[in-house]
Amino acid sequence: MQDNINSSKKLNGKDLINTGIFTAIYLTLTMAVACTIGMLPLGYVLLSFIVPFIGGIPMMLFFSKIKKFGMLMIFQIVFGVVMILTGMGYDLLIWGIITGLIAELILKASRYQKSSACILAYAVSCISVAGNYVHWLSASEEWITSKAASYGELFMNSIKGYFDMWWVFPLLVVFCFIGGLLGGLLGKAVLKKHFIKSGLI
Amino acid sequence: MIEFKDVNFTYQNAKNDAGIHDINLTIPQGQVVLLCGVSGCGKTTLTRVINGLVPHFYEGMLSGEITVCGKKVPNCELHELAPFVGSVFQNPKSQFYTVQTDTEIVFACENVGMERSLIYKNFEYAVKDLSVSHLLGKSLFSLSGGEKQKIACASVAALQPPIIVMDEPSSNLDTRTISELRSIIQIWKSKGKTVVIAEHRLYWLMDLVDRVVYMKSGRIQLDTSIENFRKLSSDELHHLGLRASSAFEAAESAKNFGYNGWLELENLRFSYNDSGKNEALNIEHLKLPKGAVIGVLGHNGAGKTTLGRCLCGLEKKMKGVVRLDGQLLDRKQRIKLSYVVMQDVNHQLFTESVWDEVLLSMEKSDAAQEQKEGHAMEILNWLGLIEYKEMHPMSLSGGQKQRVAIASALASDKELLVYDEPTSGLDYHHMLDVAYTVREMKMLNKLQFIITHDSELVTHCCDYIMFIDDGIVRICDPLGSELNKKVQTFFELHSNK
Amino acid sequence: MMFSEIYQKTATSKQLYLDPRTKILLCITVSTIIISGSGTGLMQYLQYVLSLLPLVFLIILKKYKMAIYYLFIYAIATIVPGLLLPYLPPILNLLFTGIIAFSTKLIPGMMMAYFLLTTTSVSEFVAAMDKMHITKKFTVPISVMFRFFPTIAEEYKNVRDAMILRGVGTLRNPMKMLEYRMVPFLMSVVSIGNDLSASALTRALDAPTPRTNVCHIGFTWRDIVMFIFSFICAIFYVVALLQQEGIL
């Protein structure tokens, strides 16, 4: 008898507002961590683990509110567009859409009920963070090779070693995924301890 | 017109049957109705049924017939009801969607796709009726709570709905703003709108409403005209759990203070800008006795919260000297010695049960575990929280959360306690609980500052009064016959017509 | 008619005299061209010109302090990596020095984003999106996102103050610190979000009819100039790319 606003499959105002709020939280978190830890040597690489890990708590809360298709996609797209506008490149958008789609399908398959699906979906969507690194690493390599030329042949030989480090990028993807899994588990534990117990979910 | 026939509603995740039951009510167009009752009585739920948030937003089991302006509420979408029912909520800071005042006022009109020239006309009417033209062009984040609430009213009025529903709109507002709010409702009444107000601060509405509906445990217990309601004595009102008048009743004459030590403030200055202009606080000299309960009064924006924060050491930019018992206290020492029970309690509750929350404050103490637990039980008893011991603090109602925050303040064993609006959502009995606990703390010689607009709380536990206006302390004296009169005038509502 | 910004018809100097859509286009142009493509030949000159664009805007807006900051950061990002390169081990060079060098490519883009944010109000943004026929599914989250940034800052500050007063959650126990910081913060923000949803929905946020926007935005001759400029940049970009591939 009651026309429940949540029973339809379409995204309504409440869902859109929630998406906006969590995008804002995640963006702020990412920027804050990137501007502190990302500035340290190797910190930039560690970001691939830290951001998904710390982001686990707010994102698991977000995922618990996802009951329909689309909220995650909007989140990824808005995040990606913000990255483009702030000059960080379009890679995040592309990776975000792909990982977002996969994550949405995972969630849909579990009918939005299982929290383990949420954790997996979150970990998958975190892989998009690795997308950030694609351009950076290749550009970094390019720059180094272009500079190395002016340092002489000995140096050039040591640079050859770079091209053997093909494992760096896949390692980053793995970091993101594991960071996402652990962050998701952490998020689930915190949710259970606080949000579910207090009835906010 | 609003009509309820055999309406029952229980929230989906309800505890103890929370909701409303067997409601039969008819409100004719143009009537101004007050819904009152203790916390949890169902008045807010009733307002939510009128504007459709129940069942479209707050899920649960709804039965019965509800007709608003000829529309059946459960069958209508929220956006269909919007031009008919406007809603003003309790918390000023969570009602605005845009960032600027102008755009906020026209927000509803834009959403329904109103034609531009009509929007301009409605905008002008709303601004004129509610006298908010001085607030145009400002960012909503820079406004005070009262100003935000007025913009919320303007935003709702811009759609020109025939029914307006208000859920505790006066929480956290000072007497000046409440007067302005009253004028706004007066204007709506004169335009023939139906206004339904859920409140427990009754005094500002006594001259405004036509009818009073008292609720208890989700049912309507009393439904009378305002004339009959006015005949109830203060005691009868207190028995119902309601706040009576705003009158401040003078306490006994002041006792002697000062043998336990003093807190001294010298040349306390604070401003939000680096340039030092626009001083939010400028106190030349102040001497306050330990063991006193100091009521800090003043209009919104006068600097009360700023003073509390500066005293506790939270503001780095503060200049000046603070001495306790002659000893200079720097900022870090003050942080160790003081505690603020904040206005918005959600920020201060960290753990998963009330019991843990109280024990968290005692973490630093060296006492034995049994002693700590005994003390915790005592505090929970004082504040009537024993039955909620194992519950998560966030699952409690607003008033209960406030009391948990106060409990953790008391458990922290700190010397300087600042309470920022501790009773803003509490009904009569719980306000008395808070006053009782404050008096208990007095015995332990703590210095307590209570920032409040609640005259009844001041009556029951304050012995010193401080008036702040524009960052300057105008008066700071123990309560006595002359000061009593000034306090009384402060709490009196000025009629704006 | 009383004075209000909702009656405003054209962009003013505060908004850099430009329509939001033009600003968005410029952001995308600057960041895309500068990031992709290596910095040699024609491309290099193009990238220098585009890096200067934010500086020009900063000066028009009279934000001199920011202009100096921009030059400073750019200088550091250009000079420092060259100094560090010979002294660090390869892995560090790949993952740190190279990245600093790469940031010269990001800084102009970030500056353009700074403009976009400081010279465009949220309602203008929404009006621009509506004019571009972007669905409500995106405009609502985006406008809520902007509206929430100050709220997030405020709530975070409050939780941090509460933590300081209670003396809990210091770096000594990082997991507890994370919990104590995040949980009240999230509860608070979610609670505000719920209230906001209720309030917005009772004001017809969910209405299926198209929205009227009182905020006027429109193109002027300045926007056309910027469009032509972007177009020329795009042409040079394609030419430079082809040149690099060896086709031209």
Image: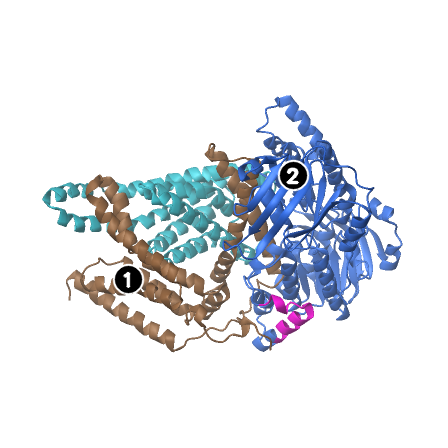
Chain colours: A cyan, B blue, C brown
Which residue occupies the extreme left position in the image? A153
Would you name the residue on which mark 1 appears?
Answer: C33
Is residue A79 rendered to the left or right of residue C192? left
The residue under the point 44% across, 54% down is A73
Query: Residue B458 or B151: which is nearer the viewer?
Result: B458
Is residue B41 rendered to the left or right of residue C95? right
- Can see residue B246? no
Is residue A13 rendered to the left or right of residue C17? right
The residue under the point 41% across, 75% down is C219
Query: Residue C241 or B131: which is nearer the viewer?
Result: B131
Q: Predominant secondary structure in magenta?
A: helix
Above or below, B120 relative to B253: below
In x, y percent, where is residue C22? Answer: 38, 69
In x, y percent, where is residue B165? Answer: 71, 60
| Number of numbered discs on residues | 2
Instruction: Give the amino acid at mark 2.
Output: Leu
Query: Residue B85 or B25: which is nearer the viewer?
Result: B85
Does the CB distance between marks 2 and 1 fall below 8 Å?
no
Inspect the magenta stretch and tell me whether residue B125 lies in it.
yes
Would you name the residue on which mark 2 appears?
Answer: B263
Q: Which residues are magenta?
A: B121-136
Q: Chain of mark 1?
A: C
Query: Residue C115 or B455: which is nearer the viewer?
Result: B455
